[in-house]
Image (tube, grey):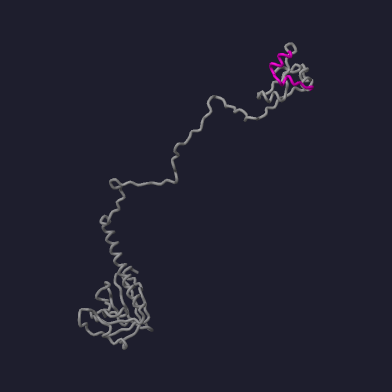
Amino acid sequence: MAESDYESVLCVKPEVHVYRIPPRATNRGYRAADWKLDQPDWTGRLRITAKGNIAYIKLEDKVSGELFAQSPVDQFPGIAVESVVDSSRYFVIRIEDGNGRRAFIGIGFVDRGDAFDFNVGLQDHFKWVKQQSELAKQAQNPDSGPKLDLGFKEGQTIKLNIGNVRKKENSSTKPRLTGTGIGLLPPPPGTKTPILLPPPGSQGMTQQPMQSSSTELLRGFAPQPSPALASHTATTDLWGDFAAATSPATTQVTQSTHWVQF
């Protein structure tokens, strides 16, 4: 089936009234109040279909679906469908019999919602027809449409925000160790350095204690001068009051011959 033979249904209303209308007396429009609204000439079903760009208003029998009248509509709003000036539920349509004969009749809906759907169905169809016509023109002349200019204008700039990168100002540089070797840091102040004592029975061995302060050395050991150089005067001058206050433990350490002089 060709596309031109395809017929779509736009709107269906189960009940519509048809009236014979008198000729229009003035150019102001039709008035539904001039019709015999309580005595419709025909009542049936209304169906709007579309075939190509043309919409068709069809009045059909409710039971059998037999066609009573048909109104081709090539544009809306237009002469084929007109609204009355005194109501939103009544319209005047132009019907054709296919042999060139035409007539104007009045139609009316019981519910205002049905009249609204009738209007919207015709509007949507001709809006679609207009869009199709514009697309066809653009396809024939693709260069005639507006072009999108993505270039920068004179003096125009853009700003890019890349994450939350912030420049660190006045940042201090970590000091680097100089020299070829790895420097050793001194022990914290107040740390006691252990002194290794010689094992008992060993002779002639000299025990060199680790570097420490003079106060810590004086607390652990008493000095022992060499037998040839020991004298009371030298001891007093070197150690002061500490050498003067002797004790048995100090005497015992002094008499030992296995210690060297610090």
Q: Main structural element of the magenta stretch: helix, strand or loop?
A: helix
* 15 in relation to 214, above or below: below
Q: Is residue 193 visible?
A: yes
Q: Is residue 247 magenta?
A: yes
Considering depth in this image, is 208 or 111 the residue closer to the camera? 208
* 207 in relation to 127, above or below: above
| Residue situated furthest bottom in the rendering | 39
Left-right relation of 85 to 243: left
Q: Residue 1, position in %: x, y?
A: 35, 69
| Residue situated furthest top in the rendering | 228
| Residue situated furthest left in the rendering | 26
> Could you tell me which residue is drawn at 33 percent across and 46 percent down?
157
Quarter holding residue 129: bottom left
Considering depth in this image, is 158 or 103 the residue closer to the camera? 158
Q: Residue 152, position in %: x, y?
A: 30, 47
Q: Residue 256, position in %: x, y?
A: 78, 18
Q: Quadrant of the C terminus?
A: top right
How many labels, in total? Answer: 0
Q: Is residue 179 magenta?
A: no
Considering depth in this image, is 58 or 145 the residue closer to the camera? 145
Q: Residue 134, position in %: x, y?
A: 28, 62
Quarter holding residue 76: bottom left
> Could you tell me which residue is drawn at 28 percent across and 46 percent down?
154
Considering depth in this image, is 42 or 3 the residue closer to the camera? 42
Q: Is residue 65 visible?
A: no
Quarter holding residue 181: top right
Left-right relation of 255 to 28: right
* 169 in relation to 107, above or below: above
Q: Which residues are magenta?
A: 230-248
